């Protein structure tokens, strides 16, 4: 069982930056793929990005096309935390952001077993 808690959301002007954090309980954090998803009002949950389990070859990340070049994902296994650095934010990035833990480096929600409660990000124009 993994318990996830997101933080770092808030209100920011377009062009600004935010860093979201997701703290995980348990001692198996490094064995999980960690993903970020978002959901805007009236829209389906959307994949943002994910980072692989930690391994000898380092961490691999995948990102949705809509955030490439603006968002990055990193993890700190010593702190059981995954981060989503969001730069050059746009009003279209407004959503509730969720982190999730799963077993495959993919953008499909069904491959993630554990979810946080979400944190609101609002980008004003």
Image (tube, rainbow, N blue to C red):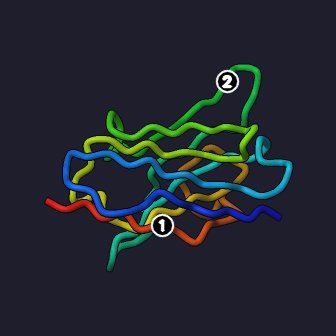
Image position, residue 95 (x, y; %)? 36, 66
Q: Is residue 6 above or below residue 48?
A: below
Residue lying at the far bottom of the rendered structure: 42
Give the SS element for disc 1: strand
Q: Nearer the viewer, mark 1 or mark 2?
A: 1
Expressed as whole percent of the image width and height from the top left, the position of residue 74 reads: 56, 37
Quarter of the image for residue 116 reads bottom right
The residue at the point 38 percent across, 45 percent down is 86
- The mark found on residue 58 in the picture is 2
Along the line of sight, which residue is nearer the eye, 53 or 16?
16
| Crowdedness near tag 2: few (<14), some (14–19) or many (≥20) residues, C-alpha within 10 Å | few
Residue 12 horizontal/vertical position (percent)? 27, 57
CA distance separating discs 1 and 2: 28 Å
Residue at the image position 25 percent from the left and 60 percent from the top: 123
Can you name the residue that lies furthest to the top here?
A: 57
Q: Kindly identify the residue that appears in the image at 21 percent across and 55 percent down.
A: 13
Neighbor class of circle 1 (other Cα within 10 Å; few <14, some 14-19, many 20+) is: many
Quarter in which the N terminus is drawn: bottom right
Q: On the picture, is 118 further left or further right than 16?
A: right
Left or right side of 67 for 8: right
Image quarter for residue 41? bottom left
Residue placed under numbered mark 1 in the picture: 119
Quarter of the figure with the C terminus? bottom left
Q: Residue at 44% across / 47% down in the picture? A: 19
């Amino acid at each position: 069982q993994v318990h996830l808690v997101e933080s770092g959301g808030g209100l920011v002007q377009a062009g600004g930056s935010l860093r979201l954090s997701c703290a995980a309980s348990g001692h198996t954090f490094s064995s999980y793929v960690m993903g970020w998803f978002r959901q805007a009002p009236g829209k389906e949950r959307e994949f943002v990005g994910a980072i692989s389990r930690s391994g000898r070859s380092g961490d691999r990340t995948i990102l949705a096309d809509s955030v490439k070049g603006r968002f990055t994902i990193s993890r700190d296994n010593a702190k059981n935390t995954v981060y989503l650095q969001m730069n050059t934010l746009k009003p279209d990035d407004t959503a509730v952001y969720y982190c999730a833990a799963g077993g495959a480096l993919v953008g499909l929600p069904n491959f993630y077993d554990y979810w946080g409660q979400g944190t609101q990000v609002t980008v004003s124009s």
